[in-house]
Image (cartoon, rainbow, N blue to C red):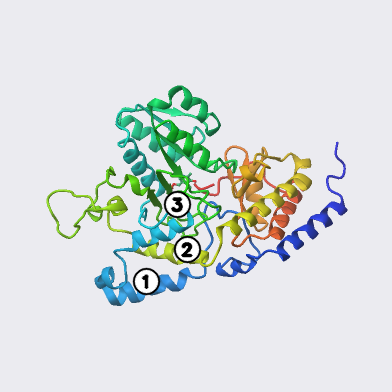
Amino acid sequence: MTTTPTTTAQVEDLTEVAARLDAVDSLAHLRERFLLPPDVVYLDGNSLGPLPAAVPPVLTDVVTRQWGADLIGSWNDNGWWEAPLRVGDTIGALIGAAPGQTVAGDSTSVQSYTALDAAVSLRPDRTLLVTDPDHFPTDRFMAAAVAERRNLDLRPVAPADLPRFLRDEGDQVAVVSYSPVDFRTGELFDMHALTRAVHDAGALVLWDLCHAAGALPVELDLIEADFAVGCGYKYLNGGPGAPAYLYVAHRHHRELRTPLPGWTGHADPFGLTRDYTPAPGIARARIGTPPILSLLALEAALSVYDGVDIAEVRAKSLSLTGFLLRCAEDLLTPFGFTSVTPSDPHRRGSQVSLRHPHAHALTRALADHGVIADMRAPDLLRFGVNALYTTHQELLTAARRLRDITAEGAYDPTPRASGPVT
Ligand SMILES: *Cc1c(COP(=O)(O)O)cnc(C)c1O
């Protein structure tokens, strides 16, 4: 039986460590680029990034001047038509993609289907589509749908088991669809090694970057990735339902055929010809009229990365998650929390997930105490950190409040659902 789970000395120590780490934080000034509510510790930016200060004035301009005054002329005069490719290139700069390979638009779900279907059509003689059994649901569902329509066998294979699987059945694999970061545990996989293994088997890889882009260095061109998708509203802070993106490596563009050949991806969209001729390059992956308000909000949001070195973002993110793991170890393990996030920095994304049987109830109680995290059923509390605005002191505050709530039993163990979203 633990009587005093934390001594005063340990608590003081963590306070000093947090203050020291924040004092030497070279990215601290970036927090001003966000409009965060006061007195809230926001650790859910891996689900919905907070509002960047640059967004409201840009949106006002887009609505009142561009739409309101310039009307339809804005497609040319205010750069609306090129926005999907322009914003795509801006995202591309964050994921190691040279210009001309990334297009912004639609949702991750749509882009995931698009990428999978286009990728398998580049490997027509192969029979297997591989996905991670722990992949985000939409990625698994889309893989199942593509497999069914294309008469492929769907094989769930965890990244750790992939090399062995490829040795046995690699010559039949068309495409492997993975995420570099497990959205539940925060485990980071080796994108480079996995991509190489997939290529050695003659297959293609699709990476879902939802939990990586903007949070850690991604080098799509360097590792010779084939396809990638990701969302605009997590670490990229583009706002609720922000457009997603699709990356296709240059070398695949000529043969690229997408399952939704919309008119805006036509070589001559305003020629209104009878037959479909795909536009050159990544522009052929455009589908319909882009959601300009959301797209330009996302573009404004991406300006928080101006002058920011993503390697520094990664270094601070690891400092934050490392510190939170230490806080959890010192303050929370005595109360039944266990970390499921790797302590090895090379295997850790930008979140910490703690297992506790009352994860749901505790997440709700934490929110009542000004700490916003989230939970993933059945028993994981998820804490996303973003090096652009999270501080070490906030993480200590979060850990202490969680400890106090748990120690005092100050939560409803069976809370009623607050709505459809957890
Ligand atoms: C958040 C997330 C999605 C979300 O897909 P949407 O179509 O944007 O709702 C997809 N895949 C992964 C890996 C995610 O983390």
Taking the spot 79% from the left edge, 55% from the top edge, the residue there is 14
Amino acid at the residue labelled 3:
Cys
Q: Where in the figure is residue 122, as x and y percent of width and height?
A: 31, 37
Q: Where in the figure is residue 420, as x and y percent of width and height?
A: 49, 47
Which is closer to the viewer, label 3 or label 2?
2
Q: Where, quadrant-wise, is the N terminus in this rendering? A: top right
As drawn, is 354 to the left or to the right of 305? right
Asked whether 115 or 40 is in front, the reply is: 115
Q: Which residue is mark 1?
A: 62
Q: Secondary structure at mark 2?
A: helix
Q: In the rendered structure, which disc, 3 or 2, sits on the residue that comes first in sequence? A: 3
Pointers 3 and 2 in contact (CB under 8 A)? no
Q: Residues within 10 Å of mark 3 (few under 14, many from 20)?
A: many
Which is closer to the viewer, label 2 or label 1?
2
Taking the spot 46% from the left edge, 27% from the top edge, the residue there is 166
Q: In the rendered structure, which disc, 3 or 1, sits on the residue that comes first in sequence? A: 1
- Disc 2 CB within 8 Å of nearest ligand 1 atom: no
Q: Residues within 10 Å of mark 1 (few under 14, many from 20)?
A: many
Q: Which mark is residue 231?
A: 3
Asked whether 125 or 240 is in front, the reply is: 125
Q: Which mark is residue 310?
A: none
Q: Answer whether residue 80 is visible to the viewer in this image.
A: yes
Q: Secondary structure at mark 3?
A: loop
Q: Where in the figure is residue 53, as x and y percent of width and height?
A: 52, 70
Q: Residues within 10 Å of mark 2 (few under 14, many from 20)?
A: many
Q: Which residue is mark 2?
A: 302
- Distance from disc 3 to disc 1, alpha carbons, whole Å, reads 22 Å
Q: In the rendered structure, which disc, 2 or 1, sits on the residue that comes first in sequence? A: 1
Q: Is residue 361 above or below residue 143?
A: below
- Disc 3 CB within 8 Å of nearest ligand 1 atom: yes
